[in-house]
Amino acid sequence: MYVDPSGEFFTSTLLVFTVIGSLFGYFTSVDSGTNVLMGIIIGAIIGATVGAVATAGPAYFFGGFSSIVNKTISDITSTLYFGTNNFGSWEDYAVAFVVGGIIRGSGSIGLSKWGLDAVARPFLNQVTKMGTRGAEFNEGRFTYDVFTRTVTLGIGCNIQLFGLELNPLKAIIRGLFSGMGRTIYD
């Protein structure tokens, strides 16, 4: 097994992801006409967090990547069913990677998995956009997302594919809920 005793791989990866995140934050805040410094800072935090999860170990990396693939299935379903572009933002995908990586990497089950998946993820999705896009916290959307993520938490079963844990049934149902949520709250 490869070990990085000097920490050079971790440090350089973290630095690269931090810079990429700050650039995404910069361009997003400029495009949104919001506080650029806040966008850069939040983008850097997002990037550093993604980098940390990506380098924390294979379980974290594959958990994060599995979450991104499942989110893509969800977004495709929502887009096709509702006939509008319902793909998430870069912040949504970054949060999906981080939360999915932490869930799988730490072996979260039960209440800790629910807290991360059904509560922390919708909360972080909104908070990151508050920093990069100047959005306001939407309590109705947050409550809706917590409810729909809670009722879909145990649906379907994971399919193992190239180290990924995919759950197409859950992703499809969440895509339908997500599109409905966008219709109601966006």
Image: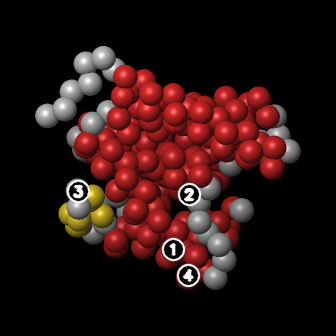
Residue 92 vs residue 143, the one in the foreground: 92
SS at circle 3: loop
Kindly identify which residue carries mark 1: 76
Where does residue 14 sit, x and y in percent of width and height?
46, 29
Q: What is the crowding at mark 2: few (fewer than 14 residues within 10 Å), some, or many (at least 20)?
A: some
Residue found 37% across the figure and 48% down from its top: 64
Crowding near pointer 3: few (<14 within 10 Å), some, many (20+)? some
**How is the rendered protein coloured?**
secondary structure
Q: Distance of mark 1 from mark 4, alpha carbons?
A: 6 Å
- 21 to 151, vertically: above or below: above
Instruction: Tell me what residue is drawn at x 64 percent, y 82 percent.
Output: 83
Q: Amino acid at mark 2?
A: Tyr
Label 1 with label 4: CB-CB less than 8 Å: yes
Q: Residue at x 35, y 35 (%)?
A: 55
Q: Residue 162: where, in percent of width, then height?
A: 23, 61
Identify the residue under disc 2. Answer: 144
Q: Which residue is mark 4?
A: 80
